[in-house]
Amino acid sequence: AAELAEQTELALADAEARRPAEWLLDHPAQLVLLCCRMHWTRDTGRALEAVASGARKAMVDAAQTQMEGLAALAKLLTGDLPRLTRRKLMSVVMAHTHARDANLAVLNDGAQGPDAFCWLAQLRAVR
């Protein structure tokens, strides 16, 4: 368990330091998916906290950034990739697609902060 925690911390730090096209390829699929979920939860939570503090466009900006990231991942899939790498990327794209849909639902619901029911319901669904 300690080794898994260490590997997760390394993957998270790597994700912060490098572009997705680089770090995604250097870590096992399960760690990549876990890190993607952790970043999505953190980023959306921060955006909702900003909305609660008066930054009305924070969730719109977060959704736009997320869509740009999803488009970049989809573009990676068009290249010549080994079978396992393609499968990993397809799983990541699916996770990002779900996150995008969840964020759009939160945005369309008019969430005013991280305590909004629509956001909390998404957190329960991810478990």
Image (cartoon, grey):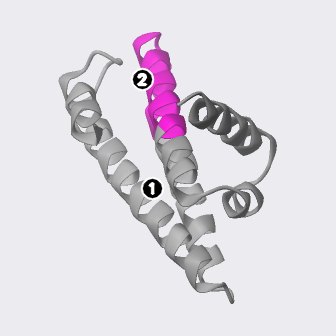
Relative horizontal placement of residue 66, taking residue 45 as reference (left or right): right
Residue 100, given in percent of the width and then of the height, sits at: 39, 52
Instruction: Count how many numbered circles sit on residues in the image.
Output: 2
Residue 115, given in percent of the width and then of the height, sits at: 28, 15
Query: Label 1 amino acid?
Result: His
For image coordinates 59% across by 30% down, the residue present is 5
Residue pushed farthest bottom?
80
Residue 63, given in percent of the width and then of the height, sits at: 47, 45
Q: Relative to the observer, which residue lies in front, 93 or 116?
A: 93
Location of mark 1 (residue)? 96
Q: Relative to the observer, which residue lies in front, 16 or 71?
A: 16
For image coordinates 56% across by 48% down, the residue present is 31
Residue 104, given in percent of the width and then of the height, sits at: 33, 46
Location of mark 2 (residue)? 48
Magenta segment, principal secondary structure?
helix
Q: Relative to the observer, which residue lies in front, 118 or 20?
A: 20
